Structure formats: C-alpha cells, structure tokens
C-alpha cells in the first residue's frame, strides 16, 4: 500500500497525467481508503485551478534576462 507521504510526492505528476497506469491505480486505491489524502488532492486541484485563473504578471527585463542566463547555463551542464 502506498503511504500518504509517497502520494504527496507524486500528486503533481498525478494531476498532470504524467504517471504510468500502475502508479495511477495505486494512488486511486490509496485515495479510496484515505480521506486525508482525498482532501489533500481536492485542495491541490483547487489551488491549481485558482492559480491558473490569475492573469500573468509582467516580468521585468532584468528578471527575464537572469532567467535566460540560468537556463542557458543549465543546458550546458551535463
């Protein structure tokens, strides 16, 4: 049986549909038996929906440039 801690570590991948069938079924089985994790999943879904509805904030040129530098550096590292 999956632990509550394991579920919380996988919840984002679960919500985004990035888990293999066997893992999704294990999570669903856990959710059938654990009201706390069912509530946690409900809260996470609501959070994602709420944040997704917010308008994007404009990004300053300095922040954009720094993010690009960090990304380019990470692409060069093995």
Image: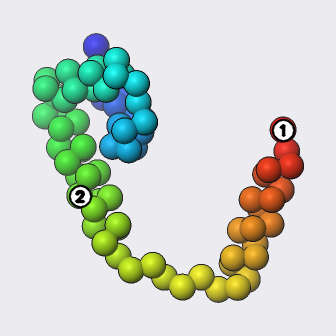
Report which residue position mark 2 lands on.
46
Q: Secondary structure at mark 2?
A: helix
Judged left or right of residue 77, residue 23 is left
Residue 13 appears anywhere in the view: yes
Report which residue position mark 1 lands on.
78
Mark on residue 10?
none
Q: Quadrant of residue 5?
A: top left
Residue at (24, 43) in percent of width and height: 41
Residue at (80, 59) in percent of width and height: 72
Q: Position of residue 21 (x, y in %)?
A: 34, 22
Q: Position of residue 49 (x, y in %)?
A: 28, 62
Pointer 2 local density, CA inside 10 Å: few below 14, some 14–19, many at least 20: few
The N terminus: image quadrant: top left
Q: Position of residue 52 (x, y in %)?
A: 35, 67
2 or 1: mark nearer the eye? 1
Q: Position of residue 65 (x, y in %)?
A: 76, 76
4, above or below 65, in the image = above
Residue at (22, 36) in percent of width and height: 37
Are dots 2 and 1 in contact, CB under 8 Å? no
Residue at (40, 24) in percent of width and height: 20
Q: CA distance from mark 2 to mark 1?
A: 37 Å
The first of marks 2 and 1 along the sequence is 2
């Amino acid at each position: 049986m999956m632990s509550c801690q394991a579920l919380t570590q996988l919840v984002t991948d679960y919500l985004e549909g990035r888990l293999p069938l066997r893992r999704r079924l294990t999570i669903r089985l856990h959710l059938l038996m654990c009201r706390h994790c069912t509530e946690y999943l409900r809260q996470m879904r609501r959070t994602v929906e709420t944040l997704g509805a917010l308008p994007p904030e404009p990004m300053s040129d300095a922040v954009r440039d720094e993010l690009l530098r960090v990304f380019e550096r990470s692409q060069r590292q093995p």
